[in-house]
Image: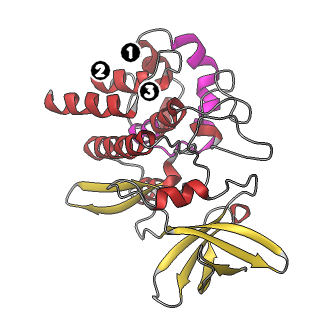
């Protein structure tokens, strides 16, 4: 493993524990040998001189639902220099683990709390002119869960940017099943905008509402959106979700066509890339209106 130094050139002593997720992504659990705290480190892609700069910018954010990075480290192995994102470790894991450890059953009240909290996190990012560019279940961490209440935080800003732009050569962004259908958005060629973060959150909510991790290949965005999205997105929310629910057959534990109309309408606006800008602030306002009208 590399010898790590911080942005002041001071050595950071980390004991690597084990890889997290796919080893090829170079994400590891580590322990700071000085204060004994567990942290997560992730190798940043070396695609430009801006690498890691936004992660440092987000380090200074102090928002309740953002897992601010702890900094960006420089790691050296021989003559090779890499940048590593230093992130907090959350012992309760991410939303995939949360779903799986509860047998796939996520109460509606918990879904609604997660929805609003991640929307608040995106609102904070977008108001600073930043885009996350990889909103998914694995990047939302459970900070606390007790007495029917949950506190989640949006993290992993390794792919974040502070400008709407076309990705640079060699820059891999997003996760397929949380991105719009290819005909509507190509993550390697098209300009990233706030609405693509919003779309990622809508896919997170679909996973939670159907109580099924959406990264499973047979339930991914490409699987059911390529036909249904194009044929039904210009129709009503009710028609869209009724059609969508048929693709889940026996696998879904909540019928998307029968959930509360107000929930359908908000999700529909988040999914509809052609329906005009629908911001995180508007989502929060609509969710609060839904809360006041049970």
Q: How far from the left and from the top, in percent, is residue 67?
A: 43, 59
Residue of label 2 = 261
Q: Residue 98: percent from the left, percent from the top?
A: 41, 57
**Disc 2 to disc 1, C-alpha distance:** 7 Å
Q: Measured from the top left, where is residue 109 in percent x and y?
A: 25, 43
**Where is the N terminus found, in terms of image quarters?**
bottom right
Could you tell me what secondary structure mostly forms the magenta stretch?
A: helix
Q: Secondary structure at mark 2?
A: helix
At label 3, counting other C-alpha atoms closer than 10 Å, the crowd grade (few under 14, some 14-19, many 20 or more) is many
Q: Nearer the viewer, residue 240 or 276?
A: 276
- Foreground: 272 or 106? 272
Residue at 63%, 30% (x, y): give it.
Answer: 223
> What is the quadrant of residue 205 in the picture?
top left
Residue at point 60% right, 57% down?
53
Q: Is residue 215 magenta?
A: yes
Magenta stretch in the rendered image: 205-233
Q: State the residue lying farthest toward the top.
A: 235
- Residue indicated by mark 1: 238
User: Are the residues at dot 2 and dot 1 in contact (C-beta closer than 8 Å)?
Assistant: yes
Looking at marks 2 and 3 on the same chain, the residue that comes earlier in the sequence is marked by 2
Residue at position x 51%, y 74% from top? 39
- Give the residue at the far bottom of this rendering: 34
The answer for how far apart the CA atoms under marks 3 and 1 are is: 14 Å
The answer to which of marks 3 and 1 sits earlier in the sequence is: 1
Q: Which residue is mark 3?
A: 270
């Amino acid at each position: 493993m590399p010898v790590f130094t911080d942005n002041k050139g001071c050595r950071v002593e980390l004991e690597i524990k084990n890889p997290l997720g796919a080893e090829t992504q170079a994400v590891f659990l580590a322990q700071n040998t000085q204060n004994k705290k567990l942290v997560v480190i992730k190798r940043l892609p070396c695609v430009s001189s801006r690498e890691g700069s936004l992660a440092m910018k987000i380090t200074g954010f102090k928002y309740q639902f953002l897992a601010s990075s702890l900094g960006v480290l420089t790691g050296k192995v021989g003559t090779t220099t890499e940048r590593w994102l230093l992130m907090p470790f959350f012992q309760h894991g991410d939303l995939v683990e949360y779903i799986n450890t509860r047998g796939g059953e996520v109460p509606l009240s918990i879904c609604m709390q997660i929805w609003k909290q991640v929307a608040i996190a995106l609102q904070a990012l977008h108001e600073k002119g930043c885009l996350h560019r990889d909103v998914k279940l694995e990047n939302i961490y459970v900070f606390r869960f007790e007495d029917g209440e949950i506190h989640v935080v949006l993290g992993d800003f390794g792919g974040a940017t502070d400008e709407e732009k076309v990705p640079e050569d060699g820059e891999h962004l997003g996760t397929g099943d949380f991105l719009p259908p290819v005909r509507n958005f190509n993550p390697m060629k098209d300009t990233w905008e706030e609405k693509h973060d919003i779309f990622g959150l809508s896919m997170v909510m679909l996973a939670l509402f159907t109580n099924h991790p959406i990264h499973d290949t047979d339930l991914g965005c490409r699987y059911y959106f390529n036909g249904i999205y194009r044929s039904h997105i210009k129709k009503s929310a009710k028609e869209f979700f009724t059609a969508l629910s048929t693709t889940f057959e026996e696998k879904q534990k909540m019928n998307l066509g029968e959930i509360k109309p107000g929930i359908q309408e908000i999700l529909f606006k988040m999914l509809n890339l052609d329906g005009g800008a629908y911001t995180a602030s508007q989502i929060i306002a609509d969710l609060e209106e839904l809360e006041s009208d049970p």
